[in-house]
Amino acid sequence: MSLTLNQLASLPPEKRLPHGDEPKVVEPWKLKSAWRAVSAPAPMREIIIDGYVRRGEVLNIIASTKIGKSWLALYLLFSVATGRNWLGRQTKKGRVLLLDNELHDETIQNRMRSVADAMGISEDEDRDMFEYLDLRGVAVGIGEIEQQLSRFEPGEFTLIVLDAKYRYFCNGLQENSNDDQTTFHNQIDQLAKRLDCVIALIHHSSKGDQGGKAVTDVGSGGGSQSRATDCHVVIRPHDESPELAVLDAALRSFPKVEPISIRWEFPLWSLAADVEAIVKQAPSRNDTRMDGATRDKTLAVLEILKREPGNTATEYKLSGGHPEQKSFRAAIAELEGEDRIAWEQEFTPPRRTVAAGGWRLVESHPTSGAVEFDS
């Protein structure tokens, strides 16, 4: 049972509990009027990354290991520190801080030099807006971060990046525990609110294919991490090229945004506005089985054509009497697309007097005499 101070004081002595067993004293909640809020809502917090995140909010940036998320974070830090656009979105210029517990100091410094040079940041720009601390090999948890940052005034920083999040899970916190994720994010929320800045957490995705997952399901550990943040950004491989990736986001204080394609050219990520954002999908079991069947059928077609007079045969013969079979049609399309076979409309099969048409092995193709198939 919980009592207010006034209620506790009004209890007669005989109803009070022995020392140490007193009911917990709580202050009564001060409820707010919804209609007053509707008529005069409070102004929204200042936007730091247009369309993504505001002051006092928490941002997740999640991608697979070694995909380049730390480079993306450096690009974001320099963009905010100088007021530049980040992947086509305007940022609010302000003081930024990087707390990096993964890289050695010399690695951080050289990466910063590469990114600053690539962005064209000149010597006369205000470089004191970007500060950092290397924490590799130091067991620092969220409690110590709060203590160290308590000396700064609200609004003194605009953006603080913690890279990488998983190494700040100290003092018994478990990454795969939803309760621990919630506890960690509650502390991060309070810190972002008190410092009146954006706190960005750089984190890795779980193992395996991420293409078929919802945006909020990408990220190693308890699923509450995506629900606890205000902006959950994920980067996944693009279907077209390994130099491309798809950036998507789940947002709390902004309307939904469409995924975008981004391109990696050392040392920067850039917006690939001319490329459709298509996430690479892992092949399904059925697709894998079909690929194997197509491969087998392709080898069989080439073997038959090698033995036939004029290296030509009808579809009926090449397919073993099943020309509509999916694997056979796929094999024919594959071989024709590679110019390894060609259709002969006037081909007349042996012991026939009427042309039936057939596929001919293309002698000019460099691999026309072989049955190897590039996987």
Image (cartoon, rainbow, N blue to C red):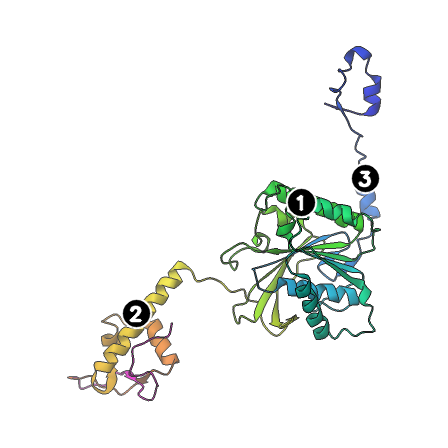
Give the label, 3 or 1, closer to the camera. Answer: 1
Q: Which mark is residue 260?
A: none
Using a 10 Å C-alpha cutoff, classify the residue at mark 1 as few (fewer than 14 neighbours), some (14 to 19) or many (20 or more). many
Query: Is residue 324 at least partly visible in the picture?
Result: no
Distance between the Cα atoms at labels 3 and 2? Answer: 71 Å
Using a 10 Å C-alpha cutoff, classify the residue at mark 2 as few (fewer than 14 neighbours), some (14 to 19) or many (20 or more). some
Q: Amino acid at mark 1?
A: Phe
Q: How many labels sit on residues?
A: 3
Q: Amino acid at mark 2?
A: Asp
Report the residue at 76% width, 64% height from top: 80
**What residue would you read off at disc 2?**
296
Q: Amino acid at mark 3?
A: Ser
Give the label, 2 or 1, closer to the camera. Answer: 1
Is 366 a magenta residue? yes
Helix, strand or loop at label 3? It is: loop
Distance between the Cα atoms at labels 3 and 1? Answer: 31 Å
Distance between the Cα atoms at labels 2 and 1? Answer: 53 Å
Q: Residue furthest top?
A: 14
Image quadrant where residue 367 sits: bottom left
Helix, strand or loop at label 2? It is: helix
Answer with mark 3 or mark 2, whichever residue precedes in sequence: 3
**What residue would you read off at disc 1?**
184
Disc 3 and disc 1 in contact, CB within 8 angstroms: no
How far across and down, in percent of the image, does residue 213 sit? 53, 55
Q: Which quadrant is home to the C terminus? A: bottom left
Image quadrant where residue 1 sits: top right
**Residue 107 vertical position relative to residue 208 in the rendered view, above or below:** below
Question: As drawn, is 334 to the left or to the right of 193?
Answer: left
Relative to the observer, which residue lies in front, 95 or 324? Answer: 95
The magenta-colored residue range is 352-375
**Residue 366 vertical position relative to residue 119 in the rendered view, above or below:** below
